[in-house]
Amino acid sequence: MDSNSTPLFSIEFYPPRTPAGEAKLDTVHETLAALNPDFFSVTYGAGGSTKKGTRQIVLKYGQLGSNVAPHLSFGGTDEEEIKTLLADYMQAGINRLVALRGDLPSGIGAAAHHRYANELVEFVRKETGDHFHIDVACYPESHPDSTSYACDVAFFKKKVDAGADSAITQYFYNADAYFYFVDYCQKAGVTVPIVPGIMPITNYANLARFSANCGAEIPHWLESRLKGFGDDVEGMREFGMEVVTGLCEKLLAGGAPGLHFYSMNLSGSVLQIWNNLSLSDR
Ligand code: FAD
């Protein structure tokens, strides 16, 4: 781990699909901006569904004074479109982005030319030099498509060698998986900061669905406990808060170079975990 860098605390949004969703996110952004996170990031629909929304939200919250990092991927997009987007972001004073392969919607994935994230990192460096701080994604419990742990780390290294400055992980609930991964990456020559992605727990059914898709493990003890709450939403939320706060404390105590919160466009859980960890005093 890069012990010289100051830990960074960031919060992720996705672009809303409706005006009502956008109005709601404006309020969430206002609430969370008061916490003074190091940056917000805004996801990007590789299939094209939310591409315009990403740009719009990034520019809007940037104008309101937040540091905002757009997520970006080639998806089915041609290079000219990416170049235009990069120019727009540079002009707006955006200096950080998250470069991804992205997940294409089923049906498009097989037909489109899938360009890996390392190709995008290379492209952004070629087009814009050192302007952007580039984050990439990584997977302490392995990416679902990967053929082996070692291959997955080798491909992660390829993104870093192409010019990525730091990485954000897929979420996980097993701190040991993160610490083992960081250690393994360091031994493989990956020395950039690897910031844990944190998913608050509020709803078991949603969490189980996401986790099945992205390959994040819900440990058996946690799953069993969460299932036990049944319809007791408040009880589950309180328990989830306790578990995730404990995970964050363990990660920071073990030297994690910050935390990246998957907010799901909600402020309550992030706010509470942030306060539990006294992050505003940092
Ligand atoms: P890559 O690093 O390209 O890797 C994809 C897979 O291919 C891995 O299995 C890897 O081992 C393998 N691989 C990599 N390079 C090669 C190569 N050269 N040859 C052969 N195999 C290779 N999705 C979105 O659609 N929009 C978002 O905004 C978004 N934001 C995310 C943010 C974070 C922090 C994380 C962790 C994930 C995010 N995702 C997002 C999901 C992500 O796009 C998916 O996990 C996707 O399947 C992989 O993206 P990647 O950038 O990690 O891909």
Image: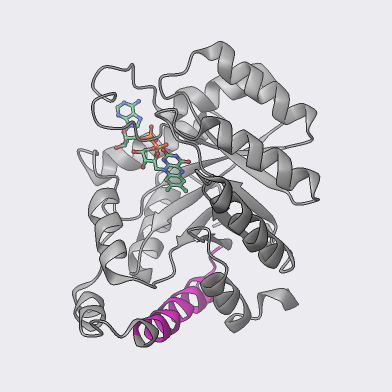
Q: Toward which corner of the image does residue 145 lie, by quadrant?
A: top left
- Does the stretch in magenta take in 66? no
Which residue is at the front of the view, 52 or 261?
Answer: 52
Ligand 1, seen in the image, is in the quarter at top left
- Does the stretch in magenta take in 237? yes
Residue at image position (63%, 34%) is 55
Residue 1 percent across, percent down from the top left: 54, 57
Q: Is residue 94 above or below residue 195?
A: above
Left-right relation of 274 to 160: right
Q: In this view, does 129 lie above or below 56?
A: above
Residue at image position (68%, 67%) is 31
For the record, the magenta segment spans 236-256
Residue 183 percent across, percent down from the top left: 41, 57
Residue 8 in view (yes/no): no
Chief secondary structure of the magenta portion: helix
Residue 273 percent across, percent down from the top left: 55, 77
Residue 264 in view (yes/no): yes
